[in-house]
Image (spheres, grey):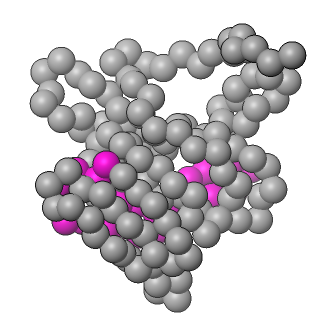
Amino acid sequence: EQTFEVRHCFQMESYELAISIISTEFADDATSYLVVGTAFALPDESEPHRGRILVFNVVDSKLVLVAEKETKGAVYCLAAFNGKIVAGINSRIQVFRWRDGEDGSKDLDTECSHHGHVLSLYIQTRGDFIVVGDLMRSISLLLYKSMDQTL
């Protein structure tokens, strides 16, 4: 039987909104994770200046927070990308790699970024290409250079 029964909830911080989500696996880690992008929509800000990327594992029908990364803006979109994730954070596109933290935990580490968009709202990936849908500048095609780890 299939239902839409709520199994577990994760409490966001005050003024924090979940605005993007993907399910992905990272390089060298076969675990399937839920990755959520958030924004802090403060009443006195016209545009969010802070957000987070939250990485969850589902264990026994419960969301377990595995890692979190503070961002300097709203995480409007997320996409799986060659064993990593790519995020549209306000006017930037950032690529994050999954790594082992110093204390044995998991962590997201910024690998590279691209500036120059107005508001990066949509991302699609194919191979080493990232297509960005921008609020004002239409569509941009970015090429990830794995040798240099640059966009």
Give the left or right position of residue 141, taking residue 9 as reference: left
The picture places residue 135, in percent across and down from the top left corner, at 20, 51
Q: What residue appears at the point 51 percent right and 55 percent down from the top-left corner?
A: 79
Nearer to us in this view, 81 or 16 = 81
* Above/below status of 68 relative to 108: above
Q: Quadrant of the N terminus?
A: top right
When asked about the image quadrant of residue 22, the answer is top right
Give the left or right position of residue 136, taking residue 16 as reference: left
Please indicate, yes or no, whether residue 103 appears anywhere in the rendered image. Answer: no
* Above/below status of 104 relative to 42: below
Q: What residue appears at the point 18 percent right and 35 percent down from the top-left corner?
A: 47
The picture places residue 31, in percent across and down from the top left corner, at 79, 49
Q: What residue appears at the point 66 percent right and 51 percent down from the top-left corner?
A: 24
Q: Farthest top residue?
A: 5
Task: Look at the image and say whether residue 64 sits in the magenta stretch.
Answer: no
Give the left or right position of residue 109, taking residue 43 as reference: right
Nearer to us in this view, 12 or 138 = 138
Please indicate, yes or no, whether residue 50 appears anywhere in the rendered image. Answer: yes
Count of residue discs: 0
Give the left or right position of residue 79, taking residue 142 as reference: right
The picture places residue 55, in percent across and down from the top left corner, at 61, 40
Q: Farthest bottom residue?
A: 147
* Above/below status of 93 relative to 143: above
Q: Quadrant of the C terminus?
A: bottom left
- What is the span of residues highlighted in magenta in the rendered image? 93-121
Per the picture, the main secondary structure of the magenta-coloured stretch is: strand
Q: What residue appears at the point 13 percent right and 21 percent down from the top-left corner?
A: 44
The picture places residue 134, in percent across and down from the top left corner, at 24, 56
